[in-house]
Image: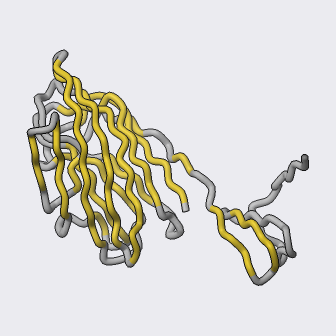
Amino acid sequence: MSIVALTSDTLVASPGAGQIEYNGQFYGTDSNASRAQMQRLVLATSQASTSGTSIDFTGIPSWVKRITVMLSGVSTNGSSTLTLQLGDSGGIETSGYAGGCLQNGTQTAWASSAMLLNRTGAAVQVNTTQAILTLLGSNQWVLSSTVYSNESGSIYMGVSSGAKTLSDTLDRVRVTTTNGTDTFDAGSINILYEG
């Protein structure tokens, strides 16, 4: 077994057959003419969701095809639904979303201003979520999400799906609430992205 050590971020020459290059990206090659691009998994810096009305992750590279948004123990001081919004170089987009959330098999909700991450709840509700965004093509992103919510000992499970076509290439995501004024008061949020 061989180990390849990559010691520089700078590509110094065209790779030959069978070589690996690193310039923020990885490639597996069979020949100079046929190279399969394999982007690495990138974990962003976790942000405490203990203040503010939104949590933004910016600077997402243009090669990204899938983003996992992770919430752990997140709550706000109100009962507005947690949402996910997408953006590009023009900023966060607040319209043109499609989709909804089904919670505990009966409670449903939908929105056009964002992708829903939970149904709704009291200020004491604590949410843990994994939401996966996948690029369908032509700047269209689709969402698949599950949420576990604990509200003073009452347990809720929910699933969400949605879609959004951006005006340009995605470079940011935002976690906020439908009313945009509830303040985060517990938990942490992070994203993992890949090509």
122 left or right of 62 in image: left
As drawn, 127 above or below 102: above
Residue nearest the observer in this picture, 58 or 150: 150
Q: Tell which residue pokes out farthest to the bottom in this image.
A: 33
Who's the residue at 56% across and 51% down the image? 42
Residue 148 % position (x, y): 28, 31
Specify the quadrant of the image occupied by residue 81. top left
87 left or right of 76 in image: right
Residue 180 % position (x, y): 15, 49
Who's the residue at 38% across and 78% down the image? 138
Specify the quadrant of the image occupied by residue 163. bottom left
Who's the residue at 54% across and 46% down the image? 43
181 left or right of 68 in image: left
Residue 184 % position (x, y): 24, 35
Q: Tell which residue pokes out farthest to the front in this image.
A: 105
Who's the residue at 75% across and 66% down the image? 28
Q: Could you tell me which quadrant the C terminus lies in? A: bottom right
Residue nearest the observer in this picture, 167 or 28: 28
Number of numbered tags placed on the structure image: 0
Q: Tell which residue pokes out farthest to the right in this image.
A: 1
Residue 165 % position (x, y): 29, 72
Q: How is the image coloured?
A: secondary structure
